[in-house]
Image (cartoon, rainbow, N blue to C red):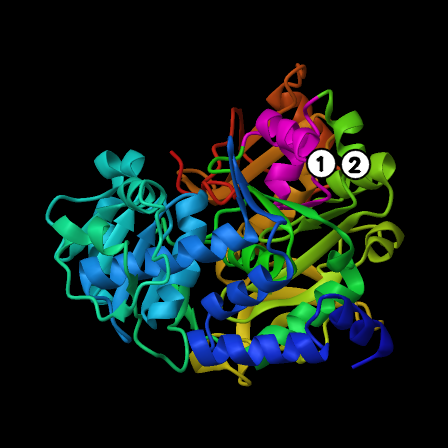
Amino acid sequence: MNRTIFTKLVKLHILTPGGICTLLGSFFRDGISLMALMRFAAKYYPKHCALAYKDKRLNYKEFYDHTQRLAKLLYCDHSLKTGMCVGLLCRNHITMALLLPALSRLGVKVKLLNTDIAPIKLKEQVERNKINLLIYDAELKENRVPTDLPCETRESEDLYKEIFDNTHGSCGKREVECSVPRSTFHHSLGTDVRLPRIRRGGEISVFTGGSSGRSKEAPRKMSVGQFLPPFYALLEQLRLDEYASVLLALPVYHGFGLATLIMSLVMGKKVSLMSHFDAKTALKTIADEKIEVVPVVPAMLARLWQINEATTIMKTVKCIISGGDRLDKKWADITQKHLGNVLFNLFGTSEAGFFMIASPDDLSRNEEVPIGRPISGVKCKVDNIDSHGIGSLWVRSRWAMISLKNKWQDTGDLVYCDGKGCYFYRGRSDNMVVCGGENVFPENVEKVINSHPEVINSMVSPAQDTDFGTVLNAKVELKPDSTLLPDTLKVWLQPRLTRAEMPHHITITTIRTLNSGKIDRKED
């Protein structure tokens, strides 16, 4: 550990004698869990704002108290115990943030489900994972939640009412074991229900491709050792400890959003939650809450820069973290032009976690956006390198999902390394298309299309043509004031793409994004 990191950890109370004692005491009371970390935060930042959502605010003491109440409510109402499984189908809001430490304190397995999931896929997930309780938002009930699920269900709004409508607390009354039925639980909040002792919080799982039906689960156990290396990297390179407020529009069910929430709360930051990303609303939140840190996926960043007021409002932002998808050079350049060296590009996978960071210097001195350099604690290698220096990216990470911890894994990404330790993305190996006898990567075509000054985003996909076999088609979203025509765009693309890469058809349209902020690749 270098001197800088040591100093930062001391300022965060993590490496002070008192802080170490508080952490150990928290782990003794709440197990190695998210609840223990919230107990630590409540000790050192009791009056700091923890969560801001619309017109609601919770400071860290209130946050910890409410997570305790929620854990007891779930323990009594649903008899949740270590090893049981709870699915969360929730957008970003206060109850969702409270549920994570509350469920961790009960030692249950938590499945963070994509809110874009189809009902039939949701039922499959419930059955496959043997989910005992599904907690969902009421607005998702009609279109996402089947009526015949083989598990208990609970609306997050009902939990919110029970927690916040019963605030009288225990007043020092004797602890009792809970055997109270749901109908009378609100009376039991007048006593201090004793939660069972646990050694470790349960697993938390995110899913890749959760709306497509090809989802893969990436579970992780609570582990301080796994948490520290990426935490060090964010402190050292992004200096997140120096900032006070974070905008969280990324969904918590996405690994990037989950990590942002947990690390922000551990450091005592104010986290402003957005249940849906909207560029104008995000800018208003940045202005009203004096936001300094903005994690985004690239499609969010592109939409922010379409708002005229963005240049002025974003001046207060000290750090923008892009991740979860390919960042186009155009948006990196625009960000650096207006805001300076505030943009970082993070790269990782749900299975391995994040493991590369591209600094503002990396972004400015390269003609294309790099995905970064490996952070301390991971090893990367490129296998099966072709004549152009492009090969498959493999990674070994100490904070990977349970079955892949400290094991080499193929990310499925094709990359190029410049020899100076900087990696550049070339596409997904499973997305390669053969057009006219040539290997073509739709991601590369999208990158070129997106470099046009009037394009916001694009989506390129293979299609069958009766005359030419497999070809590429493109959907392109333009800036609001653009009059660019498909044929004009094709002329612009001709010197920039090979014949096999050139889209046969270009459709000008609005490209729909998922709640994660990524492009909806399944849209018709």
Which disc, if any, is residue 323? Answer: none
Q: Position of residue 303 (x, y in %)?
A: 63, 31
- Percent coordinates x, y for residue 201 in the rendering: 40, 74
Disc with the residue nearer the chain's start (1 vs 2) = 1
Q: Amino acid at mark 2?
A: Thr
Q: Real-space Cα distance between discs 1 and 2?
A: 7 Å
> How many marks can you see?
2
Amino acid at pointer 1: Lys
Region rendered in magenta: 278-307
Residue 13 located left or right of residue 36? right
Point out residue 157 in the picture as x, y percentages from the top left corner.
31, 40
Q: Are marks 1 and 2 in contact (CB under 8 Å)?
A: yes
Task: Name the residue rendered at 61%, 32% in the picture.
Answer: 282
Q: Position of residue 216 (x, y in %)?
A: 38, 64
Element under label 2? helix
Residue annotated with mark 2: 316
Q: Residue at x 44, y 38 (%)?
A: 467
- Above or below, comparing residue 366 to residue 266 in the picture: above
Q: Nearer the viewer, residue 389 or 509?
A: 509
Query: For numbered disc 1, what is the local secondary structure?
Result: loop
Mark 1 or 2, closer to the camera: 1
Q: Which mark is residue 290?
A: 1
Which quarter of the picture shows residue 105?
bottom left
- Front residue of this view, candidates 58 and 4: 58
Q: Against 437, is 503 above or below?
A: above
Query: Closer to the camera, 119 or 411?
Result: 119
